Image (cartoon, rainbow, N blue to C red):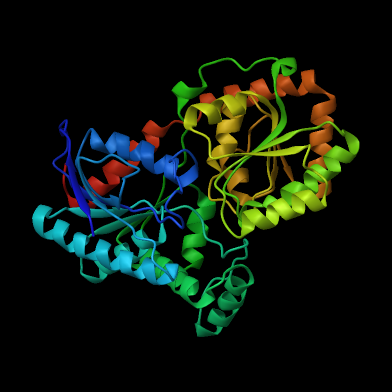
């Protein structure tokens, strides 16, 4: 095991010492995990704020994806079987966790909810009697199904759902049970919306829940959107390539759009998750969409923002979301948005001028075709989305709330 110890200057503020659990798991050595989307982006922005005002001690991957005041970066190996390596890595993280506790005596452990190892560590920490806070995004089983484990009788249902899309369902079920148990017993849980808070209660959470709302990087969206004739893509999807993100429904919707507008082009941005990505490619070929759908991979943040600005409409058929930060980012870039009707959107974005929530794939396709056939009208509506979003969402408010609650939890000011 190779360990790195990285230290940077603390800029003062609170005397709070926070142990941050943000190890990221990779399935392949060459895999890149840029913190540009969703929960990773949220954690990055919160951590940047926290680094200026407290001492953060990161228990992270090697190389670390995030910057802390002090970083313990633990190298992951890729032995076979990979699931056995998962537990070996967990043990290495656990050993370093104990070293950090002994050396730095952190006031609180913060789990930002960016990986399974961190959920296991948060559970262990709480069982040791330490103060622990976690961030919760949303809950669903692989594929998007939701089964709340209210009794032992629900475990076979969970197992069967996991088995549909996972090669080793028993081990993955254990990950889910660790996640749920730590959410039930840690001292404090942060989450983005009332929808996610309701999920936490259904999972058995009885302790405090803090609703943070969401943010976007306002400085990234200062440029005015271009006119429709200067845009490259007819539509854009941004999200992890996994079933719960609606990636197969995305193709069904676009097939209907192409039947009406044969030259329509869809850009897809997001991490390739196997085996779902290969199946998605097979479906794309079966539907004869090779000339209409283009997977751009995981873009750097600057390229992602350019892609938002280069698109006419944002499409997001995700089946489960705690907030859907990419929806807010798309609106900030001046895009009308067509998305599956989800409770989180109805709470967060209920007054958005050009957010079209649909119940069926046909409705989604019809709305996209309408937008593409009336570009000037919907460009104006998209600009209204932009005004709505830029005055409502920012990361500073979210970050300030999280740090304040951690200080209150530990009585450190």
Query: Where residue 244 appears, x then y in whole percent?
Result: 62, 56
User: Is 232 displayed left or right of 135 in the figure?
Assistant: right
Query: Where residue 17 appears, x then y in whole percent?
Result: 17, 47
Q: Which residue is drawn at 50% across and 84% down?
A: 152
Whether residue 130 appears in this view of the structure is: no
- Quarter holding residue 374: top right
Please say if 329 is above or below 288: above
Nearer to me, 23 or 409: 23
Query: Which residue reaches farthest left?
Result: 103
Q: Where the C terminus falls, by quadrant?
A: top left
User: Is 397 displayed left or right of 329 in the figure?
Assistant: left
Q: Where the N terminus falls, by quadrant?
A: bottom left
Please say if 244 is above or below 240: below
Query: Where residue 181 appears, x then y in whole percent?
Result: 39, 70
Whether residue 249 appears in this view of the structure is: yes
Q: Which residue is drawn at 78% across and 37% down?
A: 292
Query: Which residue reaches farthest bottom?
Result: 153
Q: Which residue is drawn at 44% across and 71% down?
A: 81
- Quarter holding residue 2: bottom left
User: Is 91 displayed left or right of 227 in the figure?
Assistant: left
């Amino acid at each position: 095991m190779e360990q790195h110890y990285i230290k940077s200057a603390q800029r003062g503020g609170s005397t709070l010492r926070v142990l941050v659990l943000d190890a990221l798991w990779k399935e392949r050595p060459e895999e890149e995990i840029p913190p540009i989307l969703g929960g990773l982006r949220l954690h990055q922005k919160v951590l940047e704020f926290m680094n200026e005002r407290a001492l953060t001690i990161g228990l992270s991957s090697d190389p670390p994806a995030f910057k802390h005041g002090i970083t313990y970066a633990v190298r992951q190996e890729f032995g076979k079987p990979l699931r056995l390596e998962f537990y070996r890595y967990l043990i290495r993280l656990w050993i370093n966790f104990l070293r950090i506790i002994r050396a730095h005596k952190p006031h609180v452990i913060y789990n930002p909810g960016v990986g399974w190892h961190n959920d296991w560590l948060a559970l262990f920490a709480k069982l040791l009697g330490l103060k622990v806070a976690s961030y919760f995004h949303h809950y669903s089983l692989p594929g998007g199904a939701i089964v709340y484990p209210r009794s032992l009788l629900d475990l076979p249902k969970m197992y069967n759902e996991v088995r549909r899309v996972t090669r080793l369902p028993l081990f993955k079920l254990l990950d889910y049970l660790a996640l749920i148990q730590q959410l039930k017993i840690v001292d404090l849980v942060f989450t983005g919306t009332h929808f996610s808070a309701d999920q936490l209660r259904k999972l058995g959470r009885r302790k405090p829940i803090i609703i943070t709302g969401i943010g976007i990087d306002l400085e990234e969206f200062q440029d005015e959107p271009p006119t429709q004739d200067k845009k490259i893509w007819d539509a854009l999807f941004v999200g992890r390539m996994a079933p719960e993100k609606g990636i197969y429904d995305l193709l069904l919707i676009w097939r209907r759009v192409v039947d009406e507008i044969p030259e329509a082009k869809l850009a897809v941005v997001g991490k390739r998750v196997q085996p779902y990505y290969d199946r998605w490619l097979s479906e794309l070929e079966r539907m004869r969409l090779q000339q209409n759908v283009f997977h751009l991979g995981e873009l750097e943040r600057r390229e992602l923002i350019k892609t938002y600005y280069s698109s006419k409409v944002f499409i997001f058929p995700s089946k489960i979301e705690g907030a859907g930060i990419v929806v807010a980012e798309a609106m900030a870039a001046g895009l009308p948005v067509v998305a599956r009707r989800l409770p989180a959107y109805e709470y967060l974005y209920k007054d958005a001028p050009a957010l079209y929530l649909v119940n069926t794939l046909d409705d989604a396709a019809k709305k996209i075709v309408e937008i593409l056939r009336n570009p000037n009208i919907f460009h104006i509506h998209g600009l209204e989305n932009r005004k709505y979003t830029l005055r409502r969402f920012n990361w500073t408010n979210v970050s300030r709330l999280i740090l304040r609650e951690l200080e209150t939890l530990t009585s450190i000011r």
